[in-house]
Image (tube, helix red, strand yellow):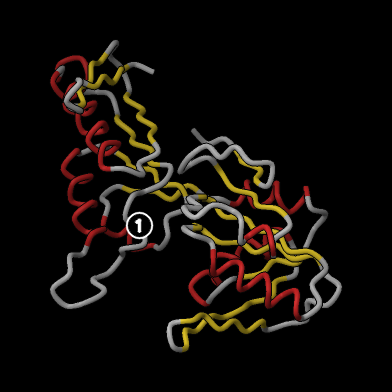
Amino acid sequence: MNYEISKYKDGQVTAKILENGNLNVTLRGNSYEDLFSAATIKEAWDANVIDNKNNSSILTLCCLIGQRSDRRFNLNESFDLKVIAKFINNMKYDQVHVLHPHSDISLALIENSFKISHFSYVERTYKTLGKPVLISPDAGAYKSTHEIAEKLNADLIPSNKVRINGAPVISVQGDVNNKECLIVDDLADGGRTFKFLADALRKQGARKVFLYVTHGQFNHGFKELKESIDHIYCTNSYKVIEDDFVTQYKVI
């Protein structure tokens, strides 16, 4: 690492370049402070124009903040991902790498951006569990999960979620009786929707239900999830989780 980040007592973030050369900045990217840190690092690096003019700069964001706010949900509300993308673009990194973004809109809004695939982490989970049936949790995740199933030569069963009077209603579109199932998705916030899906799979005869998400927030803990899901696999892109119920893969 050729830079260091410091913070003053009032919360101000500052950066210092320790040596010249190519700049590779890897941050979780799940907070505005992370984005500001990336900006201060790049500003310090840009200041040495003579030594760095022939070098490249790469910003890797392991968990892009605001990635689910990929549209304006209601009239008169802010388009948060657009605001975040503008801030990132203003840093003018040569490349921005994003681990498993929620949708391609993130890549469309962020200039010179590239997707880091989550395939290797799903593959490790799949082989660890002994080749379970993959479950796509909703229509939005189906394309991504289908591509993974093809690479793994795995069985895939889609499910769909609709809300009726505010409550999610799950439909499973395939036979899971006496099978071990692995739900695959990008992000878990509270995780309650995955509990409902796991309950639906068990009602249809699933022997075991596992969950893989790249970005594990789990802001409400695991109490409810432990009632329906056998084990969770995720990366540490959002935070480190110390719970035997979770297996984490290191990305940062």
Of 221 and 140, nearer the camera is 221
Residue 82: image quadrant is bottom left
Residue that label 1 marks: 67
Q: Position of residue 115 (x, y in %)?
A: 43, 50
Q: Relative to 209, is 137 on the left or the right?
A: left
Q: Relative to 209, is 118 on the left or the right?
A: left
Inspect the image, locate mark 1, and give the three-letter code of the amino acid beneath it. Answer: Gln
Residue 137: image quadrant is bottom right
Q: Position of residue 158 (x, y in %)?
A: 63, 77
Q: How packed is label 1: few (under 14 Cα within 10 Å), some, or many (20 or more)?
A: many
Up-down: is 91 above or below 123? above
Helix, strand or loop under label 1: loop
Up-down: is 84 above or below 179? above
The residue located at (79%, 53%) in the rendering is 129
Q: Position of residue 130 (x, y in %)?
A: 83, 54
The residue located at (61%, 67%) in the rendering is 195
The residue located at (60%, 37%) in the rendering is 242
Q: Residue furthest bottom?
A: 164
Of 134 and 178, nearer the camera is 178
